[in-house]
Image (cartoon, rainbow, N blue to C red):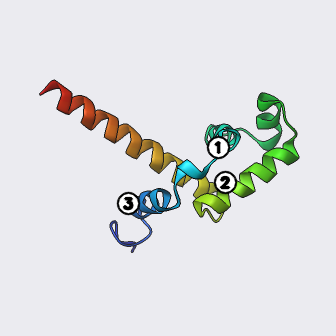
């Protein structure tokens, strides 16, 4: 059973994402990641970003390498964990500013 704080659970994914750093992604890689997380296929993402599906594949491979994702599902988990932690941080800032 994965340990929530030390194993393969969501907290581990968040720590990995922070360690690897989303700040290493280029603006185009962030665009591609957003398309992947939204569920777009390579072809759909390519059309949306006006680049070829092969270029999407190359960007996806580089993103996975930078973030330490083993497959596309892992990549989405890492990205979603990052979005959740960013949303939680924003909510904490808003709550503190109201006090």
| Closer to us: 2 or 25 | 25
Find the distance from the CA under tag 3 to the CA under tag 2: 20 Å
Residue underneath mark 2: 63
Q: Nearer the viewer, mark 3 or mark 2?
A: 2
SS at circle 1: helix
Earlier sequence position, callout 1 versus callout 2: 1
Q: Is residue 17 left or right of residue 90?
A: right
Task: Reply above or below: 10 against 30.
Answer: below
User: Label 2 neighbourhood size at 10 Å, few (<14), some (14-19), many (20+)?
Assistant: many
User: Label 3 neighbourhood size at 10 Å, few (<14), some (14-19), many (20+)?
Assistant: some
Earlier sequence position, callout 3 versus callout 2: 3
Earlier sequence position, callout 1 versus callout 3: 3
SS at circle 3: helix
- Quadrant the C terminus occupies: top left
Residue drawn where x is 33% and y is 35% of the image: 90
Q: Are marks 1 and 2 in contact (CB under 8 Å)?
A: yes
Q: Is residue 78 left or right of residue 46?
A: left
Residue drawn where x is 62% and y is 37% of the image: 38
* Label annotation for residue 11: 3
SS at circle 2: helix
Residue drawn where x is 46% and y is 48% of the image: 82
**Residue 28 on image: x %, y %:** 70, 39
Q: Is residue 49 left or right of residue 65?
A: right
For this orientation, the residue located farthest to the top is 98
Task: Reply above or below: 24 against 8.
Answer: above
Task: Reply above or below: 18 against 94.
Answer: below
* Label annotation for residue 33: 1
């Amino acid at each position: 059973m994965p340990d929530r704080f030390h194993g393969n659970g969501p907290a581990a994914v968040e720590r990995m994402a922070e360690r690897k750093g989303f700040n290493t992604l280029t603006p185009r890689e962030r665009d591609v990641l957003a398309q992947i997380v939204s569920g777009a296929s390579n072809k759909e993402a390519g059309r949306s970003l006006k680049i070829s599906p092969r270029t999407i594949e190359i960007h996806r491979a580089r993103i996975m390498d930078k973030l330490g994702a083993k497959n596309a599902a892992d990549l989405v988990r890492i990205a979603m964990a990052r979005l959740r932690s960013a949303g939680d941080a924003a909510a904490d800032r808003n709550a503190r500013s109201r006090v």
